[in-house]
Amino acid sequence: MKLFVDTGNVKEIEALAAIGILDGVTTNPSLMAKESGDYRQILKQICQIVKGPVSGEVVATDAAGMIREGRDLASIDEHMVVKVPFTREGVKACKTLAGEGLRVNVTLIFSATQAWLAAKVGASYVSPFVGRLDDIGATGMNLIREIVDIFDNYEFGTEVLVASVRHPIHVIEAARMGADIVTCPPAVIEQCFKHPLTDIGLEKFLKDWEKAQAAKV
Ligand code: E4P
């Protein structure tokens, strides 16, 4: 399962890329709004760091506007993926942009039928939001299971990108279900690294080693 980070922050992306665990980046208008500077330049910089798929989202709500913005986003760098919301207009825009050979990530997916319709029009990625479903008392991960099952029955080239991830259990379940990609906020990636027994174990190893060295002197 590929790991994307869900942020528009260059420093956070640099730090994760330096470890060697990052396959791509997702952004959205809320995330980009937190960053200062020109969004096109920030996206370009992110592409150069990650050298993998970087989703930039359109803000137009009509298909013509999404297509125009999508072409512009794609022109920033070869790694850019155009993110469009799942609406009738978004699906229409996806059909056109994918037909032109651009990669499209259809976002704000909350049902399996939405994922299926996006796949039908050539989306490269669908982004089902698990955390936001959990927030309203549904079980977000059930949606991932449904979409993975459906896509496994056909020849769609669409990857399942698990989004709105809130904690490592989402990551584990996504991997067990065979999702293609998980996009996590940096804090969740940090949680995936952490285990108190690793810290305690390392501290003990080093102390024991030091004690043994001191005894030899
Ligand atoms: C996905 O691409 C979205 O940017 C993101 O995962 C939304 O997550 P949120 O529900 O934490 O805002």
Image: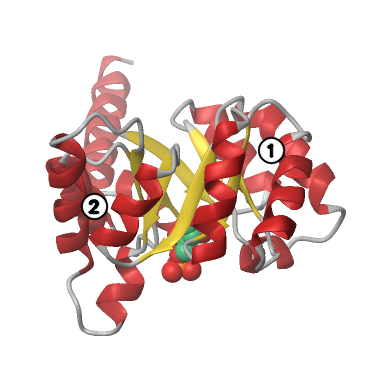
Q: Residue at x 65, y 68 (%)?
A: 61
For the residue labelled by badge 2, is the local secondary structure a helix, a strand or a loop?
helix
Which residue has dot 1 on it?
A: 46
Q: For the residue marked with disc 1, what is the amino acid?
A: Ile
| Nearest the eye: 112 or 196 | 112
For the residue labelled by badge 1, is the local secondary structure a helix, a strand or a loop?
helix
Label 1 CB, ligand 1: below 8 Å? Answer: no
Asked if the residue under mark 1 is in contact with the one under mark 2, i.e. CB atoms within 8 Å, the reply is no
Mark 2 Cα-neighbour bin, 10 Å: few <14, some 14–19, many ≥20: few
Q: Position of residue 75 (x, y in %)?
A: 78, 34
Q: Position of residue 60 (x, y in %)?
A: 71, 65
| Nearest the eye: 12 or 124 | 124
Q: In the rendered image, is residue 34 in sight?
A: no
Decide if residue 34 is on the left or right side of residue 190.
Answer: right
CA separation in Å, label 2 and label 1? 32 Å
**Mark 2 / mark 1, whichever is N-terminal:** 1
Decide if residue 21 is on the left or right side of residue 192.
Answer: right
Q: Label for residue 196?
A: 2
| Nearest the eye: 168 or 68 | 68
Say how the picture is coloured: secondary structure
Q: Position of residue 7 (x, y in %)?
A: 58, 54
Image height of 91 relative to 21, above or below = below
Q: Position of residue 37 (x, y in %)?
A: 86, 56
Image height of 115 relative to 79, above or below = below
